[in-house]
């Protein structure tokens, strides 16, 4: 009896050892010299869980790395430039964040970026498979709805795909929803909780206002206008930047929050929840964003579809065919 109790205590202490904080992670940013990459790297340099920050791009990374390395936080900063240094940049990374690729100009859809960005994601995913197959991979590059399935296919072909570790970053949709709702309700946006599900383009972005905390009440017209503003917020920024690109600073903030949550999960922190676009069986779409509990092995639990009202059920009906098309395009590209 006593022996058994002692054994149990030993197991418990081993468990608490295995969930104790390691506080020691390598993060690689691919596309680190870009409009998103630079401020994202700046924010990651300030994350106390990051001990090694690896900056990869095809241009300018020696300068970006030299600049960031003078900041008095504990992480070391390393710059890697050009395709032949991608392997070293990724070697042993715990988290890989990818904002590499071209952004939209006015009049373009996210899907118009496919021709350039699909190949970039394919190449980076192939090197991830070799250098850091266990890393958490967070894809910011558009079209996110298609780039994530591309990376999944590449990782599958290399025999290292773990659907719990591959994420499309849709955090900016949540960040925007919180900002707009906070403003409308006159409350601190940090106090607003709202799931934004589906994908990351137009009708596939589905803010579930019926589940907002604090409660968001409004006429059908108000709710429709706010939903559409969240769906089209990226285009609002593209238009305002008038040819100088798309959202960079708010995306860097959102990307740093998402990468920070992946690190908290890796570090054994509890109740880390983020919405993200991942492989999914929640709907008919093979990839779909829902709230996820993040843990040491990536997705610990998919919290599934929130309760939807009739208006939101219609949003879902509109999103699914678009998502399926976007996903198929990625699968076909990766297997061509
Ligand atoms: N998921 C989301 O919510 C959002 C996604 N985006 C997407 O993020 C991507 C990047 O946007 P920005 O930073 O504004 O663009 P940018 O043009 O300012 O920066 C992109 C960077 O990627 C680099 N790059 C190009 N080819 C590369 C390769 N093969 N390997 C590594 N790096 C490479 C470029 O040299 C550049 O430094 C775009 O596709 C954009 O649509 C933008 C905002 C929000
Ligand atoms: O709109 C774009 O092209 C960039 C993006 O994904 C966003 O801001 O949500």
Image (tube, helix red, strand yellow):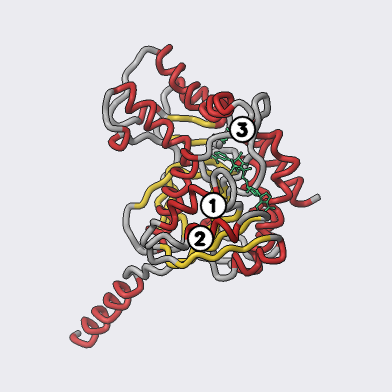
Secondary structure state at the residue bearing disc 3: loop
> Is 188 placed above or below 121 here?
above
Q: Quadrant of ligand 2?
A: top right
Q: Mark 1 highlights which residue? A: 138
Q: Mark 2 highlights which residue? A: 95
**Distance between mark 1 and mark 2 Cα atoms:** 8 Å
Q: Mark 3 highlights which residue? A: 244
Residue 321: tell me if it is visible. no
> Are the residues tagged 1 and 2 within 8 Å (C-beta)?
yes
**Distance between mark 3 and mark 1 Cα atoms:** 24 Å
Task: Give residue 41's mark.
Answer: none
Extreme-left residue of the structure: 2
**Distance between mark 2 and mark 3 Cα atoms:** 29 Å
Question: In the rendered view of the protein, which quadrant contains the N terminus?
Answer: bottom left
Which residue is located at x 35 percent, y 26 percent?
Answer: 181
Q: Is residue 90 left or right of residue 289?
A: right
In depth, the one of 240 and 1 nearer the eye is 240
Quadrant in the rendering for residue 327: top right
Q: Is residue 312 left or right of residue 73?
A: right
In depth, the one of 103 and 142 nearer the eye is 103
Q: Earlier in the sequence, mark 2 or mark 3?
A: 2
Q: Residues within 10 Å of mark 3 (few under 14, many from 20)?
A: some
Rendered location of residue 213, percent (x, y): 30, 32
Mark 2 sits near ligand 1, with its Cβ under 8 Å away: no
In depth, the one of 2 and 258 nearer the eye is 258
Q: How many marks?
A: 3
Which residue is located at x 75 percent, y 41 percent?
Answer: 115
Q: Earlier in the sequence, mark 3 or mark 1?
A: 1
Rendered location of residue 320, percent (x, y): 59, 32
Which residue is located at x 26 percent, y 28 percent?
Answer: 187
């Amino acid at each position: 009896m006593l022996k058994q109790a002692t054994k149990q205590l030993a197991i418990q202490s081993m468990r608490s050892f295995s969930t104790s904080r390691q506080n020691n992670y390598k993060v690689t940013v691919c596309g680190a010299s870009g409009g998103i990459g630079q401020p994202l790297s700046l924010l990651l340099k300030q994350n106390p869980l990051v001990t090694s920050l690896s900056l990869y791009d095809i241009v300018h990374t020696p300068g970006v790395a030299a600049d960031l390395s003078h900041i008095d936080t504990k992480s070391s900063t390393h710059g890697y430039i050009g395709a032949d240094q991608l392997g070293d940049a990724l070697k042993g990374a715990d988290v890989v964040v990818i904002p590499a690729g071209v952004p939209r100009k006015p009049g373009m859809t996210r899907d118009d970026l496919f021709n350039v960005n699909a190949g970039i994601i394919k190449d980076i995913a192939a090197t991830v498979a070799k250098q850091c197959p266990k890393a958490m991979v967070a894809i910011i590059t558009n079209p996110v709805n298609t780039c994530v399935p591309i990376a999944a296919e590449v990782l599958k072909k290399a025999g290292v795909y773990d659907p719990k570790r591959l994420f499309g970053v849709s955090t900016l949709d949540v960040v925007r929803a919180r900002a707009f709702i906070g403003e409308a309700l006159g409350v601190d946006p940090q106090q607003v909780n709202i799931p934004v599900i589906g994908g990351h383009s137009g009708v596939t972005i589905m803010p579930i206002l019926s589940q907002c905390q604090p409660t968001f009440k409004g006429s059908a017209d108000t709710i429709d206008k706010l939903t559409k503003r969240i769906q089209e917020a990226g285009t609002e920024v593209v238009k305002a930047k008038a040819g100088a690109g798309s959202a960079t600073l708010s995306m860097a903030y959102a990307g740093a929050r998402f990468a920070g949550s992946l690190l908290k999960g890796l570090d054994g922190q509890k109740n880390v929840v983020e919405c993200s676009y991942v492989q999914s069986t929640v709907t008919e779409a093979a990839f779909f964003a829902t709230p996820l509990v993040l843990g040491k092995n990536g997705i610990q639990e998919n919290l599934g579809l929130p309760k939807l009202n009739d208006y939101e059920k219609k949003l879902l009906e509109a999103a699914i065919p678009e998502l399926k098309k976007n996903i198929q395009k990625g699968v076909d590209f990766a297997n061509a």
